[in-house]
Amino acid sequence: NLIAAFLPELARGRALGRVSGWGWSLGYVGGLVSLGACLAYVTWAQEQGQQAADFVPVTMLITAALFALASLPVFLFLKERAVPQPHLQGLNLMQESFARLKQTLDHAKNYRDLRRFLACTVFYQAGIQTVITLAAIYAQQAMHFTTQQTITLILVVNITAAIGAFLFGHLQDRIGHVRAIALTLLGWIAVVALAWAAQDAGMFWAAANLAGLCMGASQSAGRALVGLLSPATRRAEFFGLWGLAVKLSSILGPLTYGAVSWISQGDHRLAMLITGSYFVAGLAILAGVNVRRGRLAALRREEP
């Protein structure tokens, strides 16, 4: 959400979806580069007879180095135009953080469509976070994938996610933000249905690739819509709320999946089917979001 807050400064309103898609797509490419570098090192280390306790920590250093390299352009070339706000008097850092959060929640009451979309985000991201977190487990437990097949699955899904984010950003700017997100949620519902019904690897691979396309598209589309509905003076705060909504969903979704799986004595197919209800709920809430009204509210209230 810290990175996302720069989005409205880097792209005009009619290009938010496109630029957000480019960024998310490059993020997936970076993940693939990191994974490839780590796998190459692990393969070399194993050939040298090293133990996991020796080479696994080095993969953390490789990842950290790639993070540092990727962040250099931001620190060297990106200009921060926002004016820092003064600290609240008489409060320590922790107290001020919660006081700022309360202020942000109070201000959010003035933005009906943004609030509604954040609620939508909690639900549909719960489904996405469940798929991201538990896809490998589902593949192994329900589809009986081997470890090698699961690693290949993760690689392929990241590639399709990069493609989905890149291409869908252009579509989002053409057909509108709400329609674009609704389209991705319909895609997610299809993913859940395919995964639930899959009896062979072919159908599951189709579901996985569709999930990759929808994952990249829905993540970048949501970020762009928050940027459009947020007033310039409070973008960082509202992107923080968006980040909070995503973090809440990362608890809600996997917790629901785990609870259903436990109650049903390990029925992963039923748990996956229940996960689909989050996408349906998100789609229903999204229907009440009016982008034009929300954008006008943001423009009217661009006050300090």
Image (spheres, helix red, strand yellow):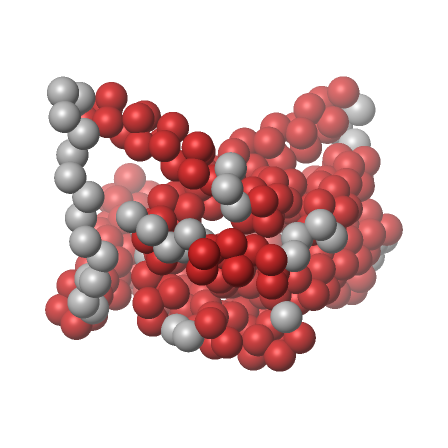
Residue located 32% across and 25% down the image: 98
Q: Residue 69 location in percent, x, y?
A: 21, 65
Q: Quadrant of residue 94?
A: top left
Relative placement, left or right, of 274 versus 176 is: right
248 to 65, vertically: above or below:
above
Residue located 82% across and 52% down the image: 193
Residue 252 in view, yes or no? yes
143 to 180, vertically: above or below:
above
Q: Which of 43 and 49 lies nearest the eye of the viewer? A: 43
Q: Which of 178 and 152 lies nearest the eye of the viewer? A: 178
Q: Residue 6 location in percent, x, y?
A: 32, 61
Residue located 71% across and 56% down the image: 185
Q: Quadrant of residue 53?
A: top left
Residue located 80% across and 61% down the image: 203
Q: How many marks?
A: 0
Q: Which of 273 and 292 lies nearest the eye of the viewer? A: 292
Relative placement, left or right, of 38 versus 271 is: left
Residue 32 in view, yes or no? no
Relative placement, left or right, of 225 versus 182 is: left
Q: Residue 138 location in percent, x, y?
A: 68, 43
Relative placement, left or right, of 24 versus 86 is: right
Q: Residue 44 location in percent, x, y?
A: 31, 62
